[in-house]
């Protein structure tokens, strides 16, 4: 009987998390609307997120995103020079630079605060969920391409469309009671010779 009661409590938590699904979507949209009101044309939208290994600052993808922002003690300057979008991060007395071509497909970049370098952001999030059964709902609610749970590892992957900023989705998922954590995934670092 004691074991059954524990299971009943666990099912109640799962049901409550599922019922709260709509509430977190509304809260996330309200937070996004508030954040959008704070952003100005002179202040490009750089988003802070966790990569699992530390904080990263995810750059905007738009070609017209130019300007400067200070976030988490890091100054990010974004300019367009000779057909390239140039990102400069001033951190701990050093300037780190990354470039992406304006023409053709380009990946989204993030500045890894812990490592002091730019890396390409993968269009996936690594999630820890209270219940893997919530993944299908999260895929539908976020407009993700798909998702896959890895129960033995204790996490799931959420695949997003290329034009969607994974950091924005991770921030929105913070309001979901079924999501324990959402981490941006980084690809290999970009090295620019001086």
Image (cartoon, grey):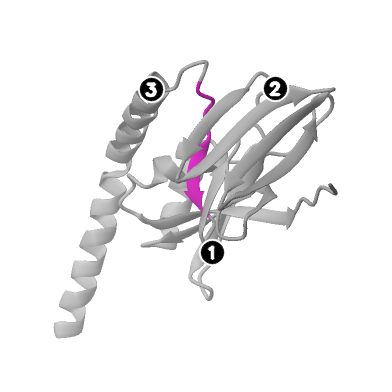
Disc assigned to residue 53: 1
| Residue holding disc 2 | 63
Please rate how many residues cluster around mark 3, counting C-alpha atoms within 10 Å: few if below 14, some from 14 to 19, many from 20. few
Disc marking residue 38: 3
Closer to the chain start, of discs 3 and 1, is 3
Find residue 128 and name its label.
none
Q: Is residue 107 left or right of residue 20?
A: right
Above or below, comparing residue 23 to residue 93 in the picture: above
The CA span between labels 2 and 3 is: 20 Å
Q: Residue at x 32, y 28 (%)?
A: 30
Q: Nearer the viewer, residue 21 or 48?
A: 48
Picture residue at 45% right of the left edge, 45% below the top? 72
- Relative to 19, residue 61 above or below: above
Give the crowd class for mark 2: few <14, some 14-19, many >=20 residues within 10 Å: some
Magenta residues span 43-50
Q: Residue at x 36, y 62 (%)?
A: 130
Tag 3–tag 1 contact (CB < 8 Å):
no
Contact between marks 2 and 3 (CB within 8 A): the answer is no
């Amino acid at each position: 009987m004691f074991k059954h009661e524990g299971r009943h409590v666990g099912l109640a938590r799962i049901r409550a998390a599922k019922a709260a699904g709509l509430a977190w979507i509304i809260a996330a949209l309200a937070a996004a609307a508030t954040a959008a009101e704070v952003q100005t044309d002179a202040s490009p939208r750089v988003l802070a997120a966790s990569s699992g290994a530390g904080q990263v600052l995810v750059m905007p993808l738009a070609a017209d995103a130019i300007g400067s922002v200070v976030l988490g003690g890091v100054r990010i300057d974004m300019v367009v020079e000779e057909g390239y979008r140039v990102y400069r991060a001033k951190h701990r007395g050093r300037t780190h630079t990354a470039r992406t071509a304006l023409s053709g497909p380009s990946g989204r970049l993030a500045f890894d605060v812990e490592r002091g370098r730019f890396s390409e952001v993968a269009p996936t999030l690594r999630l820890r969920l209270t219940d893997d059964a919530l993944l299908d709902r999260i895929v539908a609610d976020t407009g993700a391409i798909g998702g896959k749970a890895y129960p033995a590892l204790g996490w799931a992957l959420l695949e997003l469309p290329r034009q969607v900023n994974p950091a924005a989705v991770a921030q929105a998922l913070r309001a979901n009671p079924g999501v324990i954590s959402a981490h941006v995934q980084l690809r290999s670092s970009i090295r620019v010779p001086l």
